[in-house]
Amino acid sequence: MSYRIDPEFRKELGKFGVGSEWSECYHCGNCTATCPLTEEKILFPRKGIRMIQMGLKEKISAYVEPWLCYYCGDCTKTCPRDANPGELMMALRRYLTSVYDWTGLSRKFYTSKSWEFGFILFFAALVVALFSVFLPLRPDAEQMVNASGGVMINSLIAGMSPSTFVSVIEWGDWIMAMIVAGLLISNILNMFHKIVLSDHSVRVPLRAYFIGFWKLTFNFLTQARFSKCDNRNYWAGHLLLMTGYSIMFAVIVVLLPEFQTEEVNPWYHWQRLLGYYATFGILYFLIITAIGRIRRSDINLRFSHSTDWLFIIMLGLTTITGILVHIFRISGLPAATYYTYVIHLAVLVPMILVEVPFSKWSHLAYRPFAIYFSELKKAGKPRTADIGLAPAIS
């Protein structure tokens, strides 16, 4: 299979946050030899650098290895030329996210701050406007406190019963979830086409799709590949973040009527314990990550793209406003509960619409699917010789 060379691809990739230091690479192979995650036929990051230098843009679009990299940082620490191969893998993941996205928005968000901030501010303003016009605070809100002193959050809306308000928010959650899921699934199918279906050098047997699927589920739930890196704390933090966010997403979309109740349950109730775990998991990871990026002490946090910080800020604001809603609610402060609730949704909605299908959170889906697709290719039987690359990078 032959591939067209694009001499401008280096400049294009530079828009996704990678500097020019990778061009210092002279392919000693030290990064690949050092990486604990490389294996037979999956050689990174050297292979990716070589493809970039050759301008093999089409080949890069089917390149699965950046998703198999968990940025341990060993490659960058041991590079004799300071070519920063670890950060290159990060830039390639940003670029590949834009390749899979058929809407073109991911590319806009990664390469233009005005597009990303504009999108976020528009949907934040839309949420505030919808509450101001259709879901305003009732005049007698101060009376909406139950016998235990907690705010009856679903009774704060003027001219609307509690059950109707919960239904409105729940329907809004489902609509948002369906839009996000549709975008993400279509992008994953595009990823599958580029990585597996477009590779005519192998034929994947049908049974391999079923055999390899358990690894997708296992890696999504455990993030087990992190355990191969020396820094086990980062694995633990990432696992807390993933499980915490998954619980919060399930609560928002699936279990909202059981969580957004008029009665404030005691602290040991399963509802509140799940919320406390999710909050702790998210905050723990955000704090250690933010401190690490500020201090630039760990190699995998030394280089930050603007979207890395936006992700931390948006998720942090979502979590903090959620905590404040809870505090104001159990303290019996209806007005503070209502206005903070509106601000919470004004941050949460654009964060989900941006981060999940188009930016940082999409990695949560792409990584396990990349492992799945790589397993499919390893199980495939050779069909034709792939002569698109020289033996040195095959």
Image (spheres, helix red, strand yellow):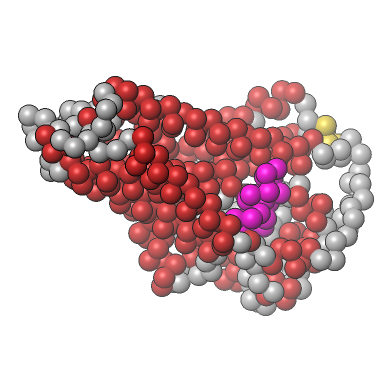
Q: Quadrant of residue 156?
A: top left
Q: Nearer the viewer, residue 271 or 123?
A: 123
Identify the residue at image location x=50%, y=33%: 177
What type of secondary structure mainly makes up the magenta span? helix
Task: Give x and y (percent) for residue 231.
Answer: 45, 58
Q: Is residue 228 visible?
A: no
Relative vertical location of residue 169 with respect to residue 243 in this rendering, above or below: above
Residue 90 on the magenta span:
yes
Q: Nearer the viewer, residue 293 or 390?
A: 293
Task: Give x and y (percent) for residue 274.
Answer: 29, 35
Q: Is residue 56 left or right of residue 116?
A: right
Identify the residue at image location x=40%, y=49%: 347
Identify the residue at image location x=44%, y=67%: 293
Task: Give x and y (percent) for residue 348.
Answer: 41, 45
Residue stretch rendered in magenta on the structure = 88-110
Q: Is residue 138 visible?
A: yes
Query: Looking at the rendering, in which quadrant would you find the C terminus?
Result: bottom right
Q: Quadrant of residue 127?
A: top left
Task: Give x and y (percent) for residue 343.
Answer: 33, 48
Q: Quadrant of residue 116?
A: bottom right
Identify the residue at image location x=13%, y=38%: 142
